[in-house]
Amino acid sequence: MRSILRQEIGWFDKDENSSGNISSRLSTDTLYVRGAVGDALGLLVQNLVTILAGFVIAYVTYWKMALVITAVFPLLAFSSYIQTKFILGFSSSADKLLAGAN
């Protein structure tokens, strides 16, 4: 916030630094920080523990099936990564449109 207040007057004349864009960025950035620290971090830890426990249970119960799951897991992880990047692409373009509307 201090860096915004220390800008020269001409900085605010640019379209990307208009009051609507700045207020939109401030409101969305706080949501991103909250999501990264709170919800996303908790979900990440929960998913990692669940995957690890599932692998341990699978290897103890039926190790042959666990080997098949281990072989397919990188494909599932890669497809999940691609899906996440695809969805984030849509949300970033929507954020730009909303910033322009503000």
Image (cartoon, rainbow, N blue to C red):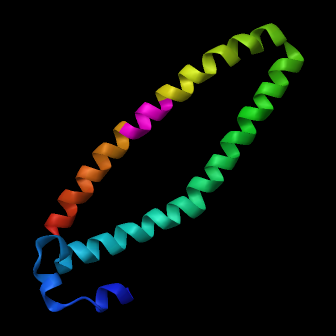
What x and y, as percent, mark residue 12? Answer: 16, 83
Location of residue 71 (image quadrant): top right
Question: 15 and 19: which one is in front?
Answer: 15
Name the residue at 63% across, 47% down.
Answer: 44
Q: Main secondary structure of the magenta part?
A: helix
Is 11 on the left or on the right of 68, as rendered? Answer: left
Location of residue 73 (image quadrant): top right
Name the residue at 24% across, 53% down.
Answer: 94
Picture quarter with the N terminus? bottom left
In magenta stretch: residue 26: no
What x and y, as percent, mark residue 61? Answer: 87, 16
- For the record, the magenta segment spans 80-85
Residue that sits furthest to the right in the current view: 60
In the displayed structure, would residue 50 be above or below residue 57? Answer: below
Question: 42 and 70: which one is in front?
Answer: 70
Name the residue at 25% across, 88% down.
Answer: 7
Location of residue 22 (image quadrant): bottom left
Name the residue at 51% across, 60% down.
Answer: 35
